[in-house]
Image (cartoon, coloured by chain):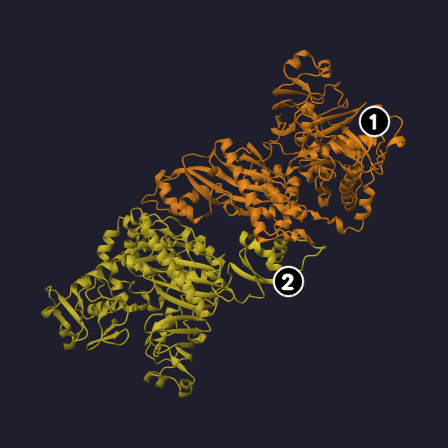
Chain colours: A yellow, B orange
Amino acid sequence: MSDGQVRVTFQPHGRAVFVLKGTKILEAASRCGLTIETPCGGLGTCGKCRVRLSRGACEPTAAERETLPAELLDAGWRLACQATVCQETVIDVPDSSLFAGRPQIVTDADTDDAEVLPAVRKVHVTLAEPSLEDDTPDLLRLQEATGAVKVDLDLLRGLGGRLRASGFAGTAVLSDHHLLDFEPGDTTSECCGVAFDVGTTTVVGSLIDLCTGREIAVETSMNPQVRFGDDVLSRIQHGSTPAGLEELRSAVAEAIDAMIGQLCEQAGLGRDRVYEITLSGNTTMQHLLCGIDPSQLGQVPFVPAFGRSLVIRGVHLGLSAHPGAAAVVFPVIGGFVGGDTVAGILSTRLTELGGPALMVDIGTNGEIVLASDGRLWAASTAAGPAFEGARISCGMRATDGAIEKVVFDDDVRASVIGGAEPIGLCGSALVDATAELLRSGIVTPAGRMLAGDDLPDELSEAIRRRVIVADDDQPAFVLADGNGNAPAVRVTQKDIRELQLATGAMRAGMVLLLRRAGLDVDDLQHVLIAGGFGSFIRRSNAQRIGLLPGGIDHRKILYVGNTSLSGAKWALASTRARLRADDLARKAQHVELSRDANFQMEFAEAMIFPAK
Amino acid sequence: MSDGQVRVTFQPHGRAVFVLKGTKILEAASRCGLTIETPCGGLGTCGKCRVRLSRGACEPTAAERETLPAELLDAGWRLACQATVCQETVIDVPDSSLFAGRPQIVTDADTDDAEVLPAVRKVHVTLAEPSLEDDTPDLLRLQEATGAVKVDLDLLRGLGGRLRASGFAGTAVLSDHHLLDFEPGDTTSECCGVAFDVGTTTVVGSLIDLCTGREIAVETSMNPQVRFGDDVLSRIQHGSTPAGLEELRSAVAEAIDAMIGQLCEQAGLGRDRVYEITLSGNTTMQHLLCGIDPSQLGQVPFVPAFGRSLVIRGVHLGLSAHPGAAAVVFPVIGGFVGGDTVAGILSTRLTELGGPALMVDIGTNGEIVLASDGRLWAASTAAGPAFEGARISCGMRATDGAIEKVVFDDDVRASVIGGAEPIGLCGSALVDATAELLRSGIVTPAGRMLAGDDLPDELSEAIRRRVIVADDDQPAFVLADGNGNAPAVRVTQKDIRELQLATGAMRAGMVLLLRRAGLDVDDLQHVLIAGGFGSFIRRSNAQRIGLLPGGIDHRKILYVGNTSLSGAKWALASTRARLRADDLARKAQHVELSRDANFQMEFAEAMIFPAK
């Protein structure tokens, strides 16, 4: 995984997540869908949130030393609200520390508590050898022993020889009722699949043991299509000619194929032990990896080429795994509500949480899904690239040198990815900074940044000094001064306006979906934050700027991580999940926000930050 | 079709068959599975067998002039027991002329009275065009209108463009729930398939209109594999090396592929209008056309590679039709009881005729199937090539110059294919001659040919003069004297021995199957003669030499023709028939005669011709 992140695994749930060093265990657990009790409000005084580190260590804080007896501390017990993650860690969570009465949500954690019902299964068989008394045909003999129905001609051509070479004992590989292979010896324990989240920027692959459903290896890679454009719209444009489409298709296929190789190498397995592949991504990514002309996705009414999931031979997508391996491409809901969203609805069990539930994936293209009373509404908003750090004066992606967190006290406290001098700020820091600027009164709810005499009196001098007037005669707020090596990092008036646009679009979408369902914000029982960006924002700050609905208990707001990957993993491990994905996609009502007469009005209203 | 044969079609049944010129209509009808009433025993006196020639003509015989009024004769009415086929003929058969109470058997006639339920169907659709109100994905829009589920990637890639080019109206082609194509315009009437009987010697292909189940065109071709050997055993040997197998595979694939082209040309259709192919042949032929190593079929215990039917992409077999066309290969019962036999059981409805029914396919490899009380037994016998004219001193195939029919009266009457001087005799004439030699007492039931003083007294002088002593000091019977241009044609003592072996093997097989079923010959309600050779033997003569069970009313013995092709055609026209074929193959008990302790004894006994 990328820089500065470490893996945290929670037991006995078997869920794992990658977080930045310094992340509180409480936060990491939340990102795994585990809500830990914090009756004292996270002050470290009640001791209810105690967990035990079974691998990895971190120094106890003063609060922990006060609250927990020394022998517990020595045994690795810590307070989830206080302790932070410093290295790869495995944490035991006693049931007594879990927030009672809430369904624990499946996230991008390992899914070994989910049902394991893969399409691919292996059966080791020892067949009776043919004799004058029993001249059953070779294939039929194997079919009767395994329940296989279909077989490919290539396999059939070699089957007689293989059966005789192995003395009629070996391992049949089946995908549903399709006989994929007959392998000599007992290979039942070597049965894998690969699940992919194919993002616009990043591709993540997970090698799954199909016997257990457990993750064996993970790889992350840049989507090499970025050289043809950062966002989906530029990809659609580039892919609208046959040559451009082929460039995009082969670029991502080669990247995915290379990742299959890397995953297998990590696990010490041959590629021919990968018998199935699942692929989840936004509608455009799924079109491109299938080599389907995306041009209709770039023009009204944004019609996808396919809706239901596709089952394609991996080789036809340019992926080398077992030659018979199928690639399952997720169903899509609309031109901008794709397989990644379906995978999210699936893996979070959004429709089964009890009570109205909202899932948001915050990014350049924001997806919003509302589940209520067995129904589903899904929409997308073009929030713009502000959350990715683009079009922000000092914006950057969440990599080394980016300020990723901002807290105001007497002055500004900023934490920088990689720990070095800051060279810019990423989306989560922009949200933090804006929330703090609103709290401190430097920015008004209308989004105007005050300066000079207009500034509130109660500001500390340190903070007040950070408000300057920039070259454009507009106020700006200095997060870091810069020096010889590093530039100054600022939040400008224009940055605030960009954030207002992005936030307003998301918020207007939520409001309109709630209205479709006849619900109020207060009715929401669950708000799930999916996707890469969402994992790094602070819930309270997102609520403060109106990106998430205010007035909701923060325990109802959960980070669910890369649900596109979780869904792909689940679909790999369970055919039932796969059917469910198609069912959810079919059931979801696609709400085209731009067609809603109220959208522009709601959008304008939603651009105003909440009063407090 | 081959030399001297003409097509006869019976209406309203829509059944057609090719017969030699001079064949009686009664016989032709029998080969189509239609049994016509002949209470007078075929003397032309009762007039019950009247039929009407609606196309084609033949001069009335004296008996017909006596029995039928002139106005009926002028209107084309003839007696089926008297009139012969001289040219392409269409014959109306009134119900009153059909033998009552007998199910009319489906044969290699057209099957337009059979159910038409093809896997492939076309649906012309006019879809609503996408709009802001309806952004249903392209494929889903088509799926919802047609019930299609699966689609190939190649088609999906071009689908959006095709839908838009055709204004969202066109014809969807489906095979079961698989979308094969979307064609512009309404092409529902152009929907074909090809059924093939792939014989060791001959390949027959039939182009079928899948809308109606009717045959549009027929092609016959030599199986080019004959250059690697005449019989299945030499093919198995040649195909036991990878290079030899590829030679055999490509030879037959190219022949079949060329026939698809010829059939389409005959019908004025493009190859892309052929959406499905069915292939029926003996087990070895089916292995070779699939490119499957046949070597196990050449060694004990003769195990086939596959049992159930196979569904393979036509392109994978080297056949060019519609790119999505599937090829369905018939299920097999055993190493020498193949898809052609299953097709025969299917197309004759052998298990549904009521009462025990026997089907025999007489040839180098003879197949015997017995159906009784819902059960099926199937066996094969290596009868040897005598029926094909091989290993017979003057033997030849049934082509120009072959004596094909022999009748003794005061002298020998022989009819020759093509009408020229005879140069040999084919299997049917050998059966005729032997039966007549038995009747006249020249050959004893033990198979000894008498000569000189041992000959019966009552022989005519002309017949007696034909018995000579040949160079091997054994008697021989001269069928034709020969002259400067043509050789003498004889039946030798050795020829009789060869026929005894061939007949004995078939008969012993029938006896053993009947014993398995606990039946006597007298219990048989139906005896069906399938296959190319069988169509040309006289029932009474086959009974006389013991090749068919004696003592059975000849009306219970029916010619059913090329049932391998009929079954292939039926399977093309009906998915239900296809399922039934698998069911029949599964149900059939494969009796390995050589394993039966009684076979050698029965064989020896069966070599003795019936006493009379």
Residue B465: mark in rendering: 1
Foreground: B304 or A276? B304
The CA span between labels 2 and 1 is 65 Å
**Position of A307 compared to B50: left or right?**
left
Quarter of the picture containing the C terminus of chain B is top right
Q: Position of residue B213 (x, y in %)?
A: 55, 34
Q: Are marks 2 and 1 on the same chain?
A: no
Q: Residue furthest top?
A: B70
Secondary structure of the residue carrying numbered label 2: loop
Residue in view at x 35 percent, y 56 percent: A285
Foreground: B251 or B358? B251
Q: Quadrant of residue B549?
A: top right
Q: Please, is residue B65 above or below residue B433 in the view?
A: above
**Amino acid type, mark 1:** Arg
Q: Position of residue A520 (x, y in %)?
A: 32, 58
Q: Residues within 10 Å of mark 2 (few under 14, many from 20)?
A: some
The chain to which mark 2 is attached is A
Quarter of the picture containing the N terminus of chain B is top right
**Amino acid type, mark 2:** Gly
Residue B582 appearing in the image = no
How many numbered marks are there? 2
Q: Residues within 10 Å of mark 1 (few under 14, many from 20)?
A: few
Q: Residue furthest front?
A: B484
Q: Position of residue B438 (x, y in %)?
A: 83, 32
Residue B381 appearing in the image = yes
Q: Quadrant of residue B347?
A: top right
Residue A167: mark in rendering: 2
Number of the front mark, 2 or 1: 1
Residue B261: mark in rendering: none
The chain to which mark 1 is attached is B
